[in-house]
Amino acid sequence: MTDLEHPFIIKLIDSVEIDDSFMLLLEFAPNGNFHDYIKKELILQKNEEDVITIFIQIVYGVKYLHSKKIAHRDLKPQNILLCHSNIVKIADFGLANRFEGKSMASYVGSDRYRAPEIYRRKRYDGFKADLYSIGAILYDIFAEFSKNEQKNEYAKECLKLSDKLQENPDDRPSLNDIVKKL
């Protein structure tokens, strides 16, 4: 994690080992996590543009991780922290792994955001599993928009993008395809 330098990735400042415990000192993210933000901001009927801007930052952060051959494998709103001006910081790299193109087999991730191929305990492409998680996050955003009956162009775009993230990993678009649509 020490070699990761990107505006949307949490910065590791230092690490220490005390007795049998290993501790990480990470960049401070004063605005909490994206999960709480979605709930709070949309209940307060804030501007959806802010939520979409955060989602776009998540996509760019994951694109950077993949360029470094890292599959996060536990992307979810609770692992997306927010700094000043709601700048995204992807965090919690406890399940992350270098992905060199060989399929992975470990059963990881959080239930709601775990790719179907992982549920089925099949070997999987870590990058495509991350894409599925991004789609699940996008679905959460759209579900909150719908709950609050704030149907607008942003919500419609969310739905279009989330429809493209298929159950079959081979049918999922690449991150570059997603970035082009943003």
Image (cartoon, rainbow, N blue to C red):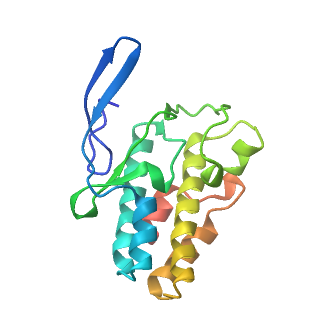
What x and y, as percent, mark residue 37? 39, 65
Is residue 182 visible in the rendered image? The answer is no
Q: How many marks?
A: 0
For residue 11, side relative to residue 110 (left or right): left
Q: Which part of the image, by quadrant, shows the C terminus? A: bottom left
What x and y, as percent, mark residue 17? 32, 16
Q: Is residue 28 above or below residue 40?
A: above
In percent of the image, x 24 and y 45: which residue is there?
28
Is residue 87 visible in the rendered image? The answer is yes
Q: Nearer the viewer, residue 138 or 39?
A: 39
Q: Which part of the image, by quadrant, shows the N terminus? A: top left
In percent of the image, x 67 and y 39: which residue is there?
124
Q: Nearer the viewer, residue 165 or 58?
A: 58
| Res 54 quadrant in image | bottom left
What x and y, as percent, mark residue 89? 33, 50
| Res 171 quadrant in image | bottom right
Q: Nearer the viewer, residue 16 or 65?
A: 16
In percent of the image, x 41 and y 52: which residue is there?
80
For residue 29, side relative to residue 74 (left or right): left
Q: Is residue 43 above or below residue 91?
A: below
